[in-house]
Image (cartoon, grey):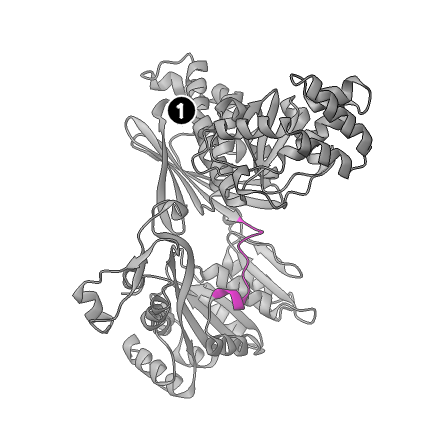
């Protein structure tokens, strides 16, 4: 089939918003002889005199289509007319927001195929499968798709965003039907819990259950979820995705499906499917199109069954450069200056889920070049970096941070990245490494940058070692960005304005919720931060018993912008809400 360029200018009346409208447009276009004739003439498939004769013949036999007349008299062959009709259909546009998509058409195309090709099956028209695409797939993809569905294909145009939303929405509907099929295939009574567990292994290998679990995983990836939760209760299992830091309820599963779903996940992650009493951790590597996805599995027995949380690590999408983190120009210059030094330790602090690892990887990319030997110790390795030696810890054989660091120092490193400082031994080795000519990057769990100094002394590091080794501390939080499509003025309580020192009449904005943000009011996340750069004034006060507030005052006097202040700056740009700043920082 000839590849059809989709970006053609179309009249406004060639846009369909429903299956009925699209059927009419397809019928009308197939019967518009001028369009078919123009396409055939443009491709030099017929002569002008042949077209004039055929149009005259069509007037004598109005019940016949132009294509039929041309085929009957041997002017062109049937495949030529079919390709012309397909090209004609590709000139039509559809709006998918309220399009009544035929579920039977959806069933024809596997989820992984529509996901990889970014096409959405809409309906069957004269035995043609009509699919929406933002651009027509190439010949090889079309042949594969035609072979899979066993129907000739027609492509119409739709925006990529609408196609993605339609895939999520309608394949979720298909999942509901699949769930019923799974339950029907199981001969086990839902009340017989023990027999359900005994038969879960067999049920987990059946096609409907495999499709159900696979489609949930792919759907979560497509919706940019960072975590997938299966939360069991007495009568049902709630499926939730963490999207932009917020848990969003996606659907409810029948409780009888839980054993089979958990067993399927255990099979994929090579866990013990017979163990239901103890927690288990595993991992799954999958490929979705060009994306390499790492899934980290955590299964813990709960009151009403095993609870499952799956961390989604997109190794292609998560890497950011320092410029993409969101630093101001001055702070970006200061951080790059710290990373250009030959020794010292730079700490990134914040609670779990505050983006510390993303910032560390951005820093590694800034220092990684041919003349530098970079070695990392991680648990787990979240992203793969070129020209970097990355070490995965194995706790089962007692290969932790201290054991790995002792060997790293004999491996001639210039830069060492330690995934997390968890104990005194790891901290001492990191500090000693920074004092012996290595640039060390690591994370620490503290609420703000000045508190990291106090925390190091609490761990057991002598003040003089902190003074000599630590060169900078970055504290950060991830905050949810306002959805730009539903901004409205934010009502801010008096106490929040008072605590953040905001004028009483200053206006701020927040997202109110719309279809573009799944009615959450948020779309994406960004980092707010504070960067403490060590100087002689701060070093002189590092002594036991000095409170973190003292270091904060000294840092602010030296030019540090605190996290709340940085958050308010972003709120003034309408990027985030004041409520989000207060929730994250205060």
Q: Which residue is rendered at x = 48% and y = 72% of the image?
A: 346
Q: Which residues are magenta?
A: 314-325
Instruction: Classify mark 1: helix, strand or loop.
Output: helix
Question: 372 left or right of 457?
Answer: right
At which x and y percent is residue 401?
A: 50, 58
Hey, which residue is sitting farthest top in the picture? Answer: 187
Q: Which residue is rendered at x = 51% and y = 68% of the image?
A: 441
- Give the class, few, some or many, for how many residues have Cα within 10 Å of label 1's Cα (few <14, many ≥20): many
The quarter in which the C terminus is drawn is bottom left
The quarter in which the N terminus is drawn is top right
At which x and y percent is residue 192?
A: 33, 16
Task: Give 190 or 129, whichever is nearer the viewer.
Answer: 129
At which x and y percent is residue 413?
A: 62, 68
Where, by quadrant of the figure, is residue 580 drawn?
bottom left
Hey, which residue is sitting farthest left in the picture? Answer: 494
Magenta-drawn stretch contains 427: no
Question: 263 left or right of 569?
Answer: right
Please say if 474 is above or below 64: below
Task: Give 373 or 189, whichever is nearer the viewer.
Answer: 189
Task: Give 139 or 20, whichever is nearer the viewer.
Answer: 20
Please say if 214 is above or below 256: below
State how many labels appear: 1
Please say if 481 is above or below 135: below
Could you tell me if residue 122 is visible in this image? no
Where, by quadrant of the figure, is residue 61 drawn?
top right
Please say if 356 is above or below 268: below
Could you tell me if residue 329 is visible in this image? yes
Pointer 1 residue:
257
């Amino acid at each position: 089939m000839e590849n059809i360029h989709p970006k053609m200018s179309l009249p406004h009346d060639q846009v369909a918003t429903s299956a009925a409208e699209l059927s009419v447009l397809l019928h009308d276009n197939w019967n518009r002889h001028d369009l078919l004739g123009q396409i055939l003439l443009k491709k030099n498939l017929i002569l002008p005199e042949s077209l004039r004769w055929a149009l005259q013949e069509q007037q004598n036999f109005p019940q016949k289509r132009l294509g039929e007349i041309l085929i009957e008299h041997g002017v062109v062959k049937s495949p030529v007319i079919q390709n012309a009709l397909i090209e004609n259909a590709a000139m039509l546009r559809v709006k998918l927001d309220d399009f009544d998509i035929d579920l039977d058409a959806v069933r024809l195309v596997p989820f992984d195929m529509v996901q990889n090709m970014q096409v959405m099956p809409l309906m069957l028209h004269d035995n043609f499968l009509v699919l929406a695409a933002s651009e027509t797939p190439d010949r090889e993809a079309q042949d594969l798709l035609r072979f899979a569905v066993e129907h000739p294909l027609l492509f119409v145009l739709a925006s990529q965003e609408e196609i993605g939303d339609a895939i999520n929405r309608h394949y979720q509907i298909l999942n509901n039907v699949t769930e019923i099929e799974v339950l029907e295939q199981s001969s086990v009574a839902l009340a017989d819990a023990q027999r359900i567990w005994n038969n879960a292994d067999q049920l987990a290998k059946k096609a409907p259950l495999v499709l159900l679990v696979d489609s949930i995983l792919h759907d979560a990836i497509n919706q940019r979820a960072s975590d997938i939760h299966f939360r069991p209760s007495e009568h049902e299992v709630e499926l939730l995705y963490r999207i932009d830091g917020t848990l969003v309820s996606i659907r409810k599963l029948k409780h009888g499906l839980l054993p089979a779903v958990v067993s399927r996940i255990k099979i994929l992650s090579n866990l013990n499917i017979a163990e239901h009493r103890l927690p288990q951790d595993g991992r799954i590597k999958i490929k979705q199109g060009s994306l390499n996805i790492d899934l980290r599995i955590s299964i813990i027995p709960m009151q009403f069954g095993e609870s499952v949380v799956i961390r989604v690590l997109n190794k292609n999408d998560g890497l950011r450069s320092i410029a993409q983190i969101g630093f101001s120009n001055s702070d970006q210059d200061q951080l790059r200056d710290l990373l250009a030094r030959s020794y010292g330790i730079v700490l990134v602090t914040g609670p779990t889920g505050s983006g510390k690892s993303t910032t560390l990887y951005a820093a590694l990319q800034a220092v990684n070049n041919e003349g530098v030997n970079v070695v990392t110790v991680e648990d787990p390795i979240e992203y793969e970096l070129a020209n970097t030696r990355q070490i995965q810890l194995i706790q089962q054989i007692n290969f932790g941070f201290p054991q790995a660091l002792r060997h790293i120092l004999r491996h001639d490193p210039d830069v060492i990245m330690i995934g997390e400082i968890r104990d005194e031994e790891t901290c001492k080795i990191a500090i000693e490494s920074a004092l012996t000519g290595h640039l060390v990057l690591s994370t620490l769990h503290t609420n703000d940058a000045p508190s990291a100094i106090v925390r190091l002394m609490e761990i057991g590091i002598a003040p003089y070692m902190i003074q000599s080794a630590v060169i900078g501390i970055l504290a950060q939080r991830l905050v949810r960005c306002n959805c730009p499509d539903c901004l409205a003025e934010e009502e801010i309580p008096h106490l929040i304005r008072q605590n953040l020192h905001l004028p009483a009449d200053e206006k701020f904005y927040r997202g109110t919720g719309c279809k573009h943000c799944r009615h959450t009011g948020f779309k994406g996340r960004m980092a707010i931060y504070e960067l403490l750069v060590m100087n002689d004034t701060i070093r002189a006060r590092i002594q036991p018993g000095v409170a973190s507030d003292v270091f904060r005052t000294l840092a602010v006097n030296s030019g540090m912008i605190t996290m709340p202040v940085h958050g308010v700056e972003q709120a003034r740009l309408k990027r985030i809400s004041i409520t989000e700043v207060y929730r994250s920082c205060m």
